[in-house]
Amino acid sequence: MIPVDDSVESLRAEHEALMQFLYLAPVGLVQADLDGEIVMINPISAQLLMPLSPDGCLTNLFAALEGVAPDLRLQCREYPRANGMVFEGLHIHLRPQGLRKATPQILSLTLLKLDEARVMAVIQDVTAEVRRERQLRQSDAWLNAILTRISDYALAALDRQGRLCDWNESIARVTGFDEHIVGSPYSIFYPRDAMTDEHLLDRLREADHNGWSMDEGLRLRADGSQFWCSALIAPLPDREAFGDDPNAPAFCLILRDISDKRAATEKRRQAAFCDHLTELANRRAFFEAAELELDRAAHTPRSLALIVFDADHFKHINDRYGHPAGDRVLCDLANVLRDTFRAVDTVARLGGEEFAVLLPSTGIEQALASAERLRAQVATRLVAADGFEIAYTVSAGVAVLNDEGLGIDALVKRADQALYFAKSQGRNRVSPWNPELATHENPPPRSRHAG
């Protein structure tokens, strides 16, 4: 039988060894209970998480991360096993600070369920690694487009304005279009609302700058059917021989039918860029899209609109009907957002009941009209949950950046100020940002479930 004093000494030694491991570990480590209350945290985690804490106190892991990873509680609650890995390497895209050239920070979060009472979070800054992965992914896509399945290619020449210069059998084989498309912009292969005139030229500029430009997504055949396609644009090496002729071939367009790879592609995209609950774009996808749009606007000035939506009185919905019912309301709102906006817009869930829509090449009047259309539609809906029919409304703030040299943070701040004003005026309304709102007291940090 071990003496009591020896048992206490043994426990003390184990605790000291664990604390030393936590403090010396090269990654962030946080131990918490199932409600997220932090039991132990090492300095790296404190350094990474402190800027995220709304009140500057790190007492609850889920509360600290709620604004950027709103579904941690839900995923932990739904994890079916007594212990194991809840998820691994979840990327958390933090809001860039300052001007548009600020580099976004990306954290990797792994959550382990230790037992019925404890969880362990592993946190790392993977900003540099993600940037390298993106470059490698683009290189792999370029090589695959060159080396695989030649029969699935459509090749066409484009002029300096992105218009098709010629037609050949490969275009007919992949898309079904005939020679009547000569002279049309290459956006003829894209679904409606999936590309703006500015985006068409952006791709050409990016091809000139990088040597090539590639994207993947749904494309159109002549009969109106859609297929999953990889589209590569590259500048022609001998185009200078044509001088300044605006109708001469300047770029090569390669369309490749990759429908057979869509499932794997979508699975990777869902894991990296989709919100767990609503399947909309997540914060990472939103800020990457915003960074790209701001870079494009810097080269070719155009307006960029942002609408921030917030479900009104959402805490009341959660308190009265329960969190699962609240989740159904959020999913219903996500569906309305998805159906209302264009394919070229980025519709994202930023956290809790806050959603954002980024609208390229959109002015204030068009953005206000779109926001009002969604607000009115939501006000007529009922969400069925556990025998109840739940009515809800949304408020919205709208802001637009023109040629002002500001970053996404400034745009988000303006939209937030407009949203706060809409709520202060009674909710269930849309408000545009104006300079007078910037002189008012800044809105207090909103609880993601305050409504």
Image (cartoon, grey):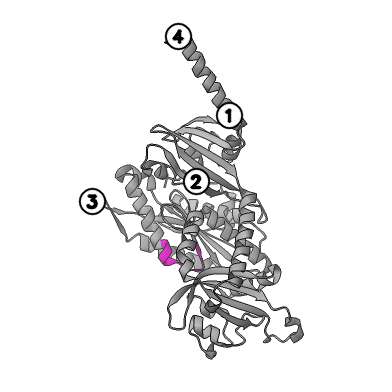
- Quickly name the residue at label 4: 3
Q: Nearer the viewer, mark 2 or mark 4?
A: 4
- Quickly name the residue at label 2: 88
Amino acid type, mark 1: Phe
User: What span is in magenta?
Assistant: 337-346
Residue 300: % across, % down: 66, 70
Res 28 seen here:
yes
Between 402 and 34, the one nearer to me in the picture: 34
Q: Mark 4 falls on what kind of element?
A: loop
Q: Residues within 10 Å of mark 2 (few under 14, many from 20)?
A: few
Of mark 3 and mark 4, the one earlier in the sequence is 4
Left or right: residue 215 versus residue 328 is right
Res 97 seen here:
no
- Quickly name the residue at label 3: 387
Q: CA distance from mark 2 to mark 4?
A: 42 Å
Of mark 1 and mark 4, the one earlier in the sequence is 4
Of mark 2 and mark 3, the one earlier in the sequence is 2
Q: Nearer the viewer, mark 1 or mark 4?
A: 4
Q: CA distance from mark 1 to mark 4?
A: 27 Å
In the figure, 446 relative to 287: above or below? Answer: above
Question: Which residue in the rendered view is the most extreme toward the bottom?
Answer: 180
- Quickly name the residue at label 1: 21
Mark 2 and 4 residues: CB-CB less than 8 Å, in contact? no
Q: CA distance from mark 3 to mark 4?
A: 59 Å
Of mark 2 and mark 1, the one earlier in the sequence is 1
Q: Nearer the viewer, mark 3 or mark 1?
A: 1
Mark 2 and 3 residues: CB-CB less than 8 Å, in contact? no
